[in-house]
Amino acid sequence: MAVDMNMKVLIVDDYNTMLRILRNLLKQLHFENVEDATDGTMALEKLRGDKFGLVISDWNMEPMTGIELLRDVRKDDTLKHLPFIMITAESKSENVIAAKEAGVSNYIVKPFNAETLKSKLVSVLGEF
């Protein structure tokens, strides 16, 4: 099944510079339909109000963290199958385990580049 390059991608980070970097990397990979949210609460509102094909979220945000967002997405019957990639500066194994237990699709440790992002996207979405 081919990846729909027009699908909406939601990027979630409370740091505007990171949102800009992610948007640019996704654009390099030909994902043009990108929306953003600056915290988990805003992300959840957007996810419930529109159809997205992928979520890429930072872990460390206030007031709702990326892991809390992931848990809420997985509890929601209409969203629970949504591919979800977590980004974090923490590579501690307990964080990776917590994310896996919460149902994360894949995990990216900062810093990363377009190749790393593409390999994670391919593992979650398939070749594109």
Image (cartoon, helix red, strand yellow):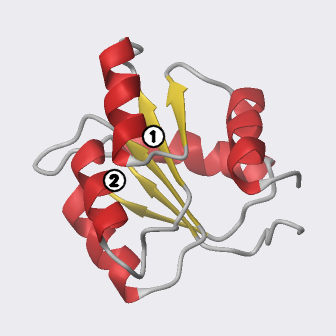
Extreme top residue here?
92
Query: Is residue 47 toward the left or the right of residue 54 in the image?
Result: left
Badge 1 density bin: few <14, some 14–19, many ≥20, Cα 10 Å: many
* Residue 36 coordinates in the image, percent (x, y): 43, 62
Extreme front residue here?
101
Mark 1: secondary structure: strand
Residue located beneath label 1 in the image: 86
Looking at the picture, tell me which residue is in the foreground, 6 or 122.
Answer: 122
The mark that comes first in sequence, 1 or 2, is 2
Residue 100 occupies which quadrant of the picture? top left
Residue 43 occupies which quadrant of the picture? bottom left
Query: How many callouts does the rendering have?
Result: 2
Distance from disc 1 to disc 2, alpha carbons, whole Å, reads: 9 Å
Residue at left 76%, top 39%?
A: 118
Dividing the image into 4 quarters, which one contains the N terminus? bottom right
Residue located beneath label 2 in the image: 70
Query: Is residue 14 toward the left or the right of residue 113 in the image?
Result: left
Q: In the image, is residue 35 above or below residue 40? A: below
Kind of residue sitting beneath label 1: Met
Marks 1/2 in contact by CB < 8 Å: the verdict is yes
* Residue 31 coordinates in the image, percent (x, y): 73, 61
